[in-house]
Image (tube, coloured by chain):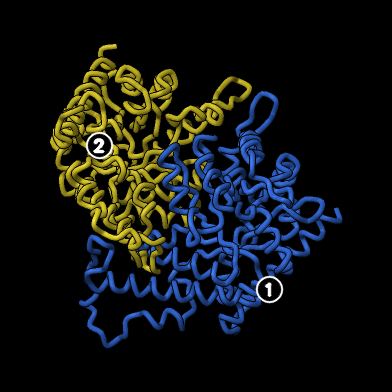
Chain colours: A blue, B yellow
């Protein structure tokens, strides 16, 4: 039997000293100027070379605009690898956002799996933020694509709208391969309330109903590790600390993947609600505030690599304290 | 302004005479024997060539197993193109299932966009069944990746768990580009009930709540076409005809994408509930029962191309009658 994902993740958190995860959400326009400069057209190139672009059948660019797109992607890939090396000493995990790679087509998907591989080589736990969802053989195909084998992430995010039919195919791969999944329960965005606060006659809200389904699935045979946590976790936004506290009680064996810190407005104090009395059971994600730290006021004038390192360290320290405070509360 | 997606879809349905969609869910093992034979290892090849496989960073195979995977994908791609040519005279639309292509990694994604392009060249309306979902810039990246530009599908499926924050980025691209989306409301699978039947104090179920959100979004400025239908549609499973009938009343301007016919057990009579009194407003999907018709008992001994053509014709006729019966009911 491969080692349980929850145990692996908790061991990595202990080793690095903080329950945090850096979100890799690369956007070319936000890269540091000297990285972008490597790619952008030199002024002596005639403008007409940048004609409207098309890709060929394999996703290869056929003209100047396509070439520029690939150059952007190469720069993004190089940037991601540098980020991984900068943050690996300070954080146990990264979360890589598929959408920003898919935006570049098939070559972007190749780059996504490159970053996954590079992160795993550095000993980082890799969460593929793909939010896939479907049923039966289709969900199995997604689970294989994104979770099976050594070159796939250690865990993925899953949208549970289909119920158990949509979640179980991911659970089967996770169980067999020592991998994990995080099912969306309470998302960090504002309109989450419009959907997820729909309440039954007793006042129980829909996200609690989803939580109960996920907790029941997560209690299945062979899913809970020595740590007492299941490889089936939940996404619980830090922007809703009241809900997080309530869910922490309702889902004692789910590790929470917690988005919303930093750029989305949640503080470390808000994140504290996601941890249990031992300061365990959650991993907090920050994306933009770390990987684009050079664009933040507080790091003005600081070299971008230094800014990212400092931001990752500050983030890790901030959340380690929040987890510790939860254990004292 | 580009033509409204709902208007384009309804015009295509009128032109072909039936509101149907063939689902492209390719699985190598189910291809006709003579297609598979083109790919499978010849018996005189030594077995040790099929060593455990790895792909390189760009998703290119590095050994025999990887080569076999690519050969499978090539066979699948060729098969998909033949299916498109066989069904194009009989059906207005296809729905292409991303998961089966993603299972082959980056090269699979390239093949997916190849099939999209081939289908659009044949004048088919193409629905990308990707069920993507996220918020803000991430959802925008997904929307651009899967919906923007001439080589992307005409419409995609979207999971609405995030609420408006997750749906609007797709709506913006759809509005600007004359494209569409279908938001999951009532899915065709059994465990849909466990999640989507969660009811409030008045007995209103969650899927009705989601329907109301989708209908409100779909009424937004510039989204409803001359036909009276919106480019924001809904996924409503044929396996729940009672719910479909109710939703037809609740969402008069949403075109329903209806899965569940054929292999999933719903009949044409079940599908009738999704149509309005004019026999409009829905498009019924069948996947396995058409594209793998050669594996069905009723087509035993029939050439596989002939079997697929006959199955597509029978499917189109069956659903055309169901739509006509709805207009008489």
Judge by depth and name the residue closer to the eye, B252 or A1. A1
Q: Is residue B168 left or right of residue A269?
A: left
Image x and y of residue A5, in percent: 63, 54
- Chain containing the residue with disc 1: A
Judge by depth and name the residue closer to the eye, A244 or B228. A244
Q: Quadrant of residue B240?
A: top left
Q: Quadrant of residue B85?
A: top left
Q: How far apart, in angstroms, are the residues tagged by discs 1 and 2? A: 54 Å
Q: Secondary structure at mark 2?
A: helix
- Residue identifier under label 1: A313
**In this view, A244 is above or below B236:** below
Quarter of the picture containing the C terminus of chain B is top left
The residue sitting at 43% across, 39% down in the picture is B217
The residue sitting at 58% across, 47% down in the picture is A175
Q: Is residue B266 left or right of residue A268?
A: left
**In this view, B220 is above or below A279:** above
* Marking on residue B54: none
* Marking on residue B291: 2
**Other-residue count near label 1 (Cα within 10 Å), few / some / many at <14 / 14–19 / ≥20:** some
């Amino acid at each position: 039997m491969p080692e349980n994902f929850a145990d692996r993740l908790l061991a990595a958190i202990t080793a690095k000293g903080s329950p945090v995860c850096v979100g890799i959400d690369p956007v070319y326009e936000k890269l540091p100027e000297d990285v972008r400069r490597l790619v952008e057209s030199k002024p002596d190139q005639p403008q007409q070379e940048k004609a409207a672009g098309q890709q060929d059948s394999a996703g290869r660019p056929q003209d100047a605009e396509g070439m520029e797109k690939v150059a952007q992607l190469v720069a993004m890939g190089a940037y991601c690898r540098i980020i991984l090396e900068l943050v690996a000493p300070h954080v146990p995990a990264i979360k890589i956002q598929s959408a920003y790679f898919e935006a570049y087509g098939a070559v972007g998907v190749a780059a996504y799996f490159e970053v996954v591989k590079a992160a795993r080589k550095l000993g980082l736990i890799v969460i593929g933020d793909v939010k896939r969802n479907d049923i039966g053989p289709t969900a199995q195909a997604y689970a294989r694509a994104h979770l099976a084998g050594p070159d796939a992430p250690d865990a993925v995010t899953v949208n549970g709208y289909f119920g158990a039919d949509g979640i179980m195919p991911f659970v089967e791969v996770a169980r067999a391969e020592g991998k994990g999944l995080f099912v969306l329960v309470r998302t960090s965005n504002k309109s989450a309330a419009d959907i997820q606060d729909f309440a039954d006659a007793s006042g129980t809200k829909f996200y609690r109903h989803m939580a109960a389904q996920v907790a029941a699935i997560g209690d299945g045979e062979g899913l809970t590790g020595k740590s007492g946590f299941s490889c089936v976790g939940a996404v619980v936004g830090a922007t809703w600390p009241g809900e997080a506290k309530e869910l922490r009680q309702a889902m004692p064996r789910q590790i929470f993947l917690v988005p919303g810190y930093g750029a989305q407005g949640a503080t470390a104090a808000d994140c504290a609600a996601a941890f249990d009395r031992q300061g365990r059971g959650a991993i907090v994600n920050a994306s933009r505030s770390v990987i684009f730290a050079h664009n933040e006021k507080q790091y003005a004038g600081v070299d971008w690599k230094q800014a990212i390192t400092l931001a990752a360290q500050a983030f890790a320290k901030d959340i380690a304290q929040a987890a510790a405070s939860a254990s004292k509360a």
